[in-house]
Amino acid sequence: MAKRFSGKQIATMSLSTALIAAGAFIRIPLGMDMYITMQVFFVVLSGYLVGRASAASAFVYMVLGLVGIPIFAAGGGFYYIFKSTFGYIIGFVAAAYIIGTLTKKQDCSYIRYLLSGLLGVAVIYIIGITYLYFIVTLYLGKSVTAEYIFITLFLTTIWKDILVTVLAAAIAKKIRRLVRQ
């Protein structure tokens, strides 16, 4: 049976989609169409506040970008599935679902928020780096070393994603407390 969303849920999911898209434009270029962005922050925060439905927000973001709206960090369009960074966008959907599932209780502790957010970030990296590896090696025919992946794709960005997860957990805890009052 299909789940129906309330008007409030649709509005919240739409806002989440818009924030994930806006996060793509807050960026620092790393080269090879790779950027440090604020998308992870908004995906994690959306998971905390919207719940599992945040996966729908991330999915809509992905679909809007694939149909040609230039809301990804390096543009948009169907060809984007052949970009090495598209796996991170797929990871947003999975991470939002996991985070939303783990924090659906209204009275989560800060530690629960933080650990579920870090798990979501790990999922984004696992899917993103795996996808990147296969696109670069199989589609582009280039070789990529484990050292390159670890230094360029992990160490240069993970610190930022840990920091924004810590921040998102604090913000979510505060927002949920205010909503309850």
Image (spheres, rainbow, N blue to C red):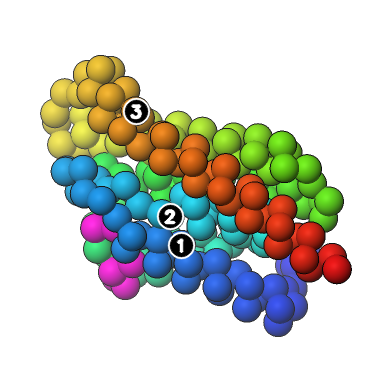
* Image position of 13 (left or right of 9): left
Please identify the dominant SS of the magenta region. Answer: loop
Magenta stretch? 68-74
Q: Say which mark, if any, is on residue 155.
A: 3
Q: Say which mark, if any, is on residue 140.
A: none
- At label 2, the amino acid type is Gln
- At label 1, the amino acid type is Ile
Percent of width and height locating residue 16? 55, 67
> Is 71 contained in the magenta span?
yes
Q: Quadrant of the C terminus?
A: bottom right
Residue 144 image-quadrant placement: top left
Percent of width and height locating residue 40? 46, 50
How far is the residue under mark 3 from the one under mark 2?
A: 17 Å
- Dot 1: few (<14), some (14–19), or many (≥20) neighbours within 10 Å? many
Closer to us: 151 or 68? 151
In the picture of the structure, the residue carrying the numbered disc 1 is 20
The residue tagged with tag 3: helix, strand or loop?
helix
